[in-house]
Amino acid sequence: MRNTAKLLVLPLAIGALLVGCGSDDSSDDTSSTTTNQTEQPAGGSNTGGDSSNAGKAQVLALAADPSGALAYEETELSANAGKVTVDFTNDSPVAHDAVFNDADGNEVGRTPVITGESTVAEFEVKPGDYTFYCSLPGHEEAGMKGTLTVK
Ligand SMILES: [Cu+2]
């Protein structure tokens, strides 16, 4: 029990130093430390793992071959885990989209099918290997696909 008591007193002393000179009350109340330690669990939501990284969406540029070939201009994309925004441009006269799958083949995001314009797809990724492809008939088979590596 003595060791436990020391462990409880130390953070209190530190806490008192941080709070300032006026908090003599808490240093006397070693018996009530258990109640003090349950302070404001709701305020600790910021410590939820990697949420600090997830706040910033990354923009990944992806373009279809502007001449109309069944190909993307980028076949290897990379990102950090979290939110990604794929900025997909198709300046060609052929309709295309971009569909993203995780390593298990489950779809995680897709753009609309567009022709001669740009669009975006937003989704979240975890570390691992993803693939993307154009879902229009024959396009993936012709080589319209690539990989997205997430760190
Ligand atoms: Cu296509």
Image (cartoon, grey):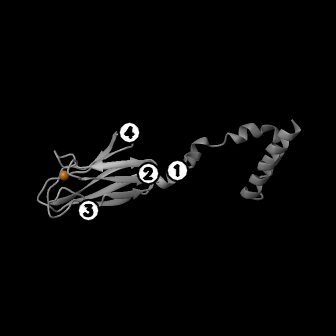
Disc 3 to disc 2, how far (Cα)? Answer: 24 Å
To which residue does mark 3 refer? 73
Upstream in the sequence, badge 4 or badge 2?
2
Is disc 3's CB within 8 Å of ligand 1?
no
Upstream in the sequence, badge 3 or badge 2?
3
Disc 1 to disc 4, how far (Cα)? Answer: 23 Å
Element marked by disc 1: loop
- From the viewer's side, name the closer residue of 135 and 38: 135
Query: Which label number is shown at residue 82?
Result: 2
Foreground mark, 4 or 2, reads 4
Upstream in the sequence, badge 4 or badge 3?
3
Q: Is residue 126 above or below residue 1?
A: below
Relative placement, left or right, of 25 versus 76 is right
Query: Around disc 1, counting alpha carbons within 10 Å, would you say few (fewer than 14), some (14 to 19), or many (20 or more)?
Result: few
In the current view of this chain or complex, which residue is farthest to the top?
Answer: 1
To which residue does mark 1 refer? 50
Q: Quadrant of residue 85?
A: bottom left
- Circles 4 and 2 in contact, beta carbons < 8 Å: no
Say whether residue 25 is visible: no
Q: In x, y percent, where is residue 7?
A: 81, 44
Is disc 1's CB within 8 Å of ligand 1?
no
Q: In x, y percent, where is residue 60?
A: 34, 59
Q: Residue at x 16, y 59 (%)?
A: 69
Disc 1 to disc 2, how far (Cα)? Answer: 9 Å
Query: Around disc 3, counting alpha carbons within 10 Å, would you say few (fewer than 14), some (14 to 19), or many (20 or more)?
Result: some
To which residue does mark 4 refer? 104
Is disc 2's CB within 8 Å of ligand 1?
no
Query: Around disc 4, counting alpha carbons within 10 Å, would you say few (fewer than 14), some (14 to 19), or many (20 or more)?
Result: few
Foreground mark, 3 or 1, reads 3
Upstream in the sequence, badge 3 or badge 1?
1
